[in-house]
Image (spheres, rainbow, N blue to C red):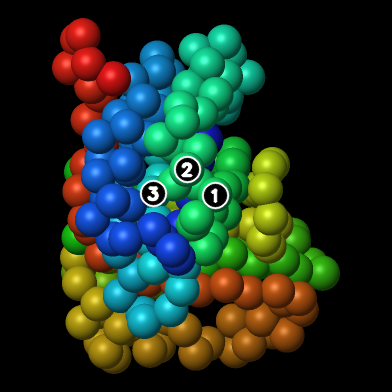
Amino acid sequence: MTEGLLFVLAEPGRVPEAEFHDWYDTEHAPARVGVPGIRSGYRYRALDGRRPGWLAWYELDTEVLRGEAYQAIRRRSPREQSVVERLETLDRRVYELIDDQGTPVVESPVVVSVALSSGDERGLDAWYREEHVPLLLAIPGWRRVRRYRRVEGSGPDLLAFHEIDDVGLFDRTAYRAATSTPWRSEVMARVTARERRVFGYHNTARPCPPGEG
């Protein structure tokens, strides 16, 4: 089994917000967390004022995505087809875990996703492992950092996924120190693509009760 992350950015576009949330919370997300091997699912809203404004992420075994149960739920109902056709954005990415440090968090108040491509992936990995992640995890309230490699979908090649208590951590002296070292400057000079997003907790996906959905 390979530990993975299903990471989906969405923007309602022509879908009214109430309809968007009803579809996600009563059909789309429950169907996914009802598949064996998809262990959890969460929805987050953007805190950075950027679009897409919504993130759904699911912790899973990547083999599940090739299984019959998952393929069955990807066959869209008429309702889902109608919603998807009107969405401004539905950006689906699949990642495989390469590193996990810190303490697991249930329903983290804030997540920070930093997607990167680099001309020096070995140097980027060494910086994360030896300097950047240790400095971040030393900050009270910085709970966990997982790093992934993209195996499906668009976007930069690598993803650092941070779980933190509050956006106020960005104002801490320790955070500013962790993001302004000479080594970081060297590494970032070789980065060819970067996407940084900040999201706040919205809700947790629950499977449909027996007999529903």
Residue at 25 percent of width and 77 percent of height:
167
Q: Which amino acid does label 1 sit on?
A: Glu
Is 36 on the left-hand or right-hand side of 174? right
Question: Do labels 2 and 1 touch, CB within 8 Å?
Answer: yes
Q: How crowded is mark 1: few (under 14 residues within 10 Å), some or many (20 or more)?
A: few
**Viewer-closest of 168 and 213:** 213
User: Can you identify the residue that label 3 sits on?
Assistant: 56
Secondary structure at numbered mark 2: helix
Is 112 on the left-hand or right-hand side of 148? left
Counting from the top left corner in percent of width and height, residue 88 is at 52, 63
User: Can you identify the residue that label 2 sits on?
Assistant: 82
Residue at 59 percent of width and 81 percent of height:
184
Q: How far apart are marks 2 and 3 (CA)?
A: 19 Å
Q: How crowded is mark 2: few (under 14 residues within 10 Å), some or many (20 or more)?
A: few
Counting from the top left corner in percent of width and height, residue 195 is at 57, 72
The quadrant in which the N terminus is found is: top right
